[in-house]
Amino acid sequence: MGANPGEDAKRAPASRCGGRIDRAPATTATARTHRDYLEGIGNTAATADSWREKRWNRYYLQTCQYVVAQMLRGSGVAAGTVLDVGTSHGNWLPFLRRKRFKRVLGVELHPVRAAVAQRAGYNAVYNCDAAAMPLADGSVDVAMANDVLVHVLQLADKVAVLREVERVLRPGGVFIFNHAMSPAFGLSGYQVIDHCSFVDLDGLLRLVLTGCGLRVVDIKPTYYAFTARRPTRVAEVIRNLVLSMPFGPYLRFLRDGVHARRLGLQQSDSVYLLALKAGDEVR
């Protein structure tokens, strides 16, 4: 899954959901769910038709994959069965294959995207909601959700996904997932804007702690594209010029490292959590 930069990146290429900030009021309550936006979300790679959008997507993806790779190395979990929650078109499949997982499974709510992911080479892709997966208890070693829970708008639905992932994880298995941080977008607490939701770190940790039995053992920032303010036009031009350079994404990556030390976790556009299921301890 993921926001749709085919529309959003034209307005704010620094952030997948940031382009919506000025066009729709934030709210702490909405009757809409992720199912109401099913056609729009999950098209990050497929709708990036300009060279600039593709460069930004490359930067986002490489940054997230670097963070996830760090978490996988530190988890000590064997590369058995991995579950890609919110598979979309299968953009993470090459990364998961490189990590030498024996079985790569996917879950995708949109039937067309699920079929595309299946053809891409997953061992199996289930066309269903991540809150009700046709998988046996304790059948998965690692579950991952990249830019997925940000689009699950109802807190009760987020909890349902967390509990379902906990069910299918084996004891000692881990769930690695990210979520957009509200302070990075100039918001507070839990807010919903169109198809994106934002939460502060305390709220996210409380959601995991009170909503399921998983235990958070690691937290890492991703990229610092927004940092609570919209860039000036001059700054935006400079950012796009830097990104157009051969090593542009790498320079952005170095910049993010500086921001991580200076600004902290909550100013990152999103943070990754590694949550452990009770049982065998991480080695």
Image: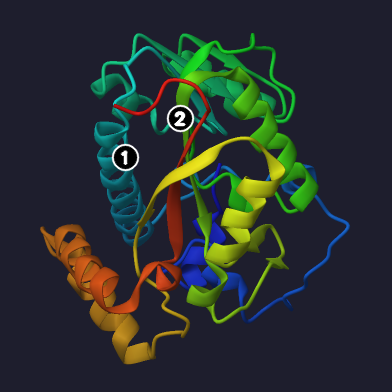
Q: Quick check: 220 above or below 126? A: below
Tell me the crowding category of disc 2: few under 14, some 14 to 19, or many 20 or more residues within 10 angstroms, Cα based: many
Q: Are marks 1 and 2 in contact (CB under 8 Å)?
A: yes
How many circles with numbers are drawn on the protein?
2
Q: Quick check: 264 above or below 125? A: below
Taking the image as shown, residue 150 lies to the left or right of residue 24, namely left
Where residue 222 sits: x, y (%)? Answer: 35, 58
Residue 39, picture quadrant: top right
Q: Amino acid at mark 1?
A: Met
Q: Amino acid at mark 2?
A: Val
| Structural distance between the alpha carbons of marks 1 and 2 | 10 Å
Q: Nearer the viewer, residue 54 or 50?
A: 54
Residue under the point 32% across and 17% down: 78
Q: Which residue is mark 2?
A: 174
Asked if one can make out residue 60 in the rendered structure from this viewpoint, the answer is: yes
Which residue sits furthest left?
246
Q: Secondary structure at mark 1?
A: helix
Where residue 281 sits: x, y (%)? Answer: 39, 26
Q: Which mark is residue 71?
A: 1
Taking the image as shown, residue 66 lies to the left or right of residue 166, namely left
Residue 80, picture quadrant: top left
Residue under the point 61% across and 28% down: 165
Quadrant location, the C terminus: top left
